[in-house]
Image: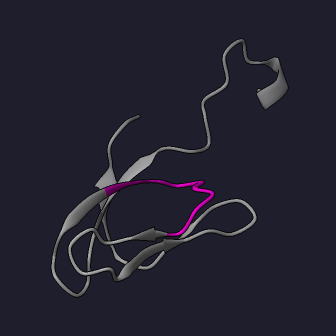
Amino acid sequence: MKRENTLVPKPRSHFVSVQCNKCGEKTTVFTHTTTNINCKACGEPLAERSGSKAKILGKLLGTLDQ
């Protein structure tokens, strides 16, 4: 079935849990973020914005909704 024919299509974006490679701090990040996300504890970049899907730089632990 085509995506246009479904009544309520599933979103292609979701929230993910990311762990910092440097200090191990866990943070929730949106997959299609429009800003660069840094770790709150050490300032290490966790996600870089791009045209659509963000580039996740930390360790991806899993999705939070589906």
Q: How is the image coloured?
A: one colour
Q: Position of residue 43 (x, y in %)?
A: 32, 80
Q: Is residue 2 visible?
A: no
Q: Residue furthest bottom?
A: 22
Query: Split into 4 quadrants, where in the image is the N terminus?
Result: top right
In which quadrant of the rendered view does residue 9 lie?
Answer: top right
Q: Where is the C terminus found, in terms of image quarters?
A: top left
Depth check, front residue: 23 or 3? 23
Q: Residue at x 64, y 61 (%)?
A: 53
Q: Position of residue 35 (x, y in %)?
A: 58, 62
Is 33 magenta? The answer is yes
Q: Which residues are magenta?
A: 28-36
Does residue 2 lie above or below 33 as drawn? above
Instruction: Tell me: 51 left or right of 16.
Output: right
Above or below residue 29? Residue 49 is below
Asked if residue 5 lies left or right of residue 52, the reply is: right
Residue appearing at x 60%, y 29% in the figure: 10
Q: Which secondary structure class fits the magenta region best?
A: loop
Residue that protrudes farthest toward the top in the picture: 7
Q: Position of residue 14 (x, y in %)?
A: 49, 44
